[in-house]
Image (cartoon, helix red, strand yellow):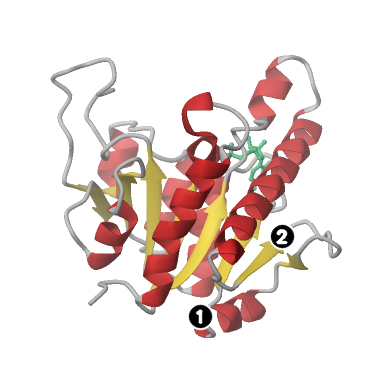
């Protein structure tokens, strides 16, 4: 039996890029879609928040002298491109989906309507949230926290390229130690870069737990939903 009935899966844009590091790798998207299908078949209500860093990040643009808000709107549009790629892959597998965007673009997707999103989930459709929060200066991690609170998700599954939260960068330090459990206060005090501070405090204030796990290991999304010790659990 799954431990969680309603979850938010946060996929960074990077996750869709595979080894290329940028853009979209359709094979990678397909493999994520297969894993998502399995969860839907188990009766898990799944909403996905997709990032856009594989295409564009606002801070990168503003570092080069662009207006920050404009650069961020570009980032939000980038996330919508990713949502459509994921929607396509899921529908090819006959998983019913709805994309909802925080910035209205009704020819492409539904606008974000909280009650409608919940209804879709209850009907077994995967809801994919695009366009971040719709506001510049925020991130898709904050979007995941916000949407989780709004739709009353029990957990955020934070898919990463590493096995969880470490005390130092495991790619640089071979002795880096992984935490099995952490509190949000510890996360903030230790300055561990799992999510930005806005997202972290939103999760903390609304008591939304987080499971940080490695997306590159096949079957890990399911393990996380089953409540297995798959990475790092952040809560309390
Ligand atoms: N963004 C934004 N407001 C939001 C969410 C995202 O302005 O509510 C912009 C921001 O520029 C960000 C970009 O969209 O850099 C892509 O999102 P993010 O960096 O969170 O994607 P990820 O790192 O998860 O791929």
**Residue 157, image quadrant:** bottom left
Q: Give the residue number, with chain letter if any, for mark 1.
A: 124
Instruction: Tell me if label 1 and label 2 are in contact, CB under 8 Å.
Output: no
Q: Which of these two is toward me, 149 or 76?
A: 76
- Quadrant position of the N terminus in the picture: bottom left
Please say if 129 is above or below 80: below
Question: What is the x, y in percent for residue 32?
Answer: 45, 52
Q: Is residue 202 visible?
A: no
Question: What is the x, y in percent for residue 35?
Answer: 39, 58
Question: What is the x, y in percent for residue 225?
Answer: 30, 64
In the visual, does 179 lie left or right of 113? left
Q: Which mark is residue 192?
A: none
Tell me which residue sits at (17%, 24%) in the image: 176
Disc 1 crowd rating (10 Å Cα; few below 14, some 14-19, many 20+) is: some
Count how many numbered circles sit on residues in the image: 2
Q: Is residue 23 visible?
A: yes
Q: Give the residue number, with chain letter if any, for mark 2.
A: 101
In the visual, does 176 lie left or right of 4? left
Q: Which of these two is toward me, 27 or 62?
A: 27
Tell me which residue sits at (77%, 16%) in the image: 65
Ligand 1: give its quadrant: top right
Q: Secondary structure at mark 2?
A: strand
Give the CA separation, mark 1 to mark 2: 19 Å
Which circle's residue, 1 or 2, is located before the other in the chain? Answer: 2
Label 2 CB less than 8 angstroms from ligand 1: no
Question: What is the x, y in percent for residue 37?
Answer: 44, 66
Please say if 169 is above or below 96: above
Tell me which residue sits at (17%, 40%) in the image: 179
Q: Which of these two is toward me, 73 or 235?
A: 73
């Amino acid at each position: 039996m799954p431990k969680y009935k309603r979850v938010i899966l946060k996929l960074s844009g990077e996750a869709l890029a595979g080894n290329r590091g940028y853009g979209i790798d359709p094979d990678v998207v397909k493999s994520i879609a297969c894993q998502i299908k399995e969860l839907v078949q188990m009766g898990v209500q799944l909403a996905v928040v997709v990032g856009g860093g594989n295409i564009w990040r606002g801070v990168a643009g503003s570092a080069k002298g662009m207006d920050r808000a404009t650069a961020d709107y570009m980032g939000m549009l980038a996330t919508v491109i990713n949502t459509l790629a994921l929607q396509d892959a899921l529908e090819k597998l006959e998983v019913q989906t709805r994309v909802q965007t925080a910035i209205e673009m009704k020819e492409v997707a539904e606008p974000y309507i909280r009650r409608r999103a919940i209804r879709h989930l209850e009907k077994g459709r995967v809801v994919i949230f695009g366009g971040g929060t719709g506001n510049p200066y925020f991130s898709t991690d904050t979007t995941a926290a916000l949407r989780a609170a709004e739709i009353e998700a029990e957990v955020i599954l934070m898919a990463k390229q590493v096995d969880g939260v470490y005390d130092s960068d495991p790619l640089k330090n071979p002795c880096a130690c992984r935490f099995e459990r952490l509190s949000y206060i510890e996360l903030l005090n230790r300055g561990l870069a799992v999510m930005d501070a806005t997202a972290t405090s939103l999760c903390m204030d609304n008591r939304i737990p987080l499971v940080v796990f490695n997306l590159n290991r096949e079957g890990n999304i399911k393990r996380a939903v089953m409540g297995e010790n798959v990475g790092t659990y952040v809560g309390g």
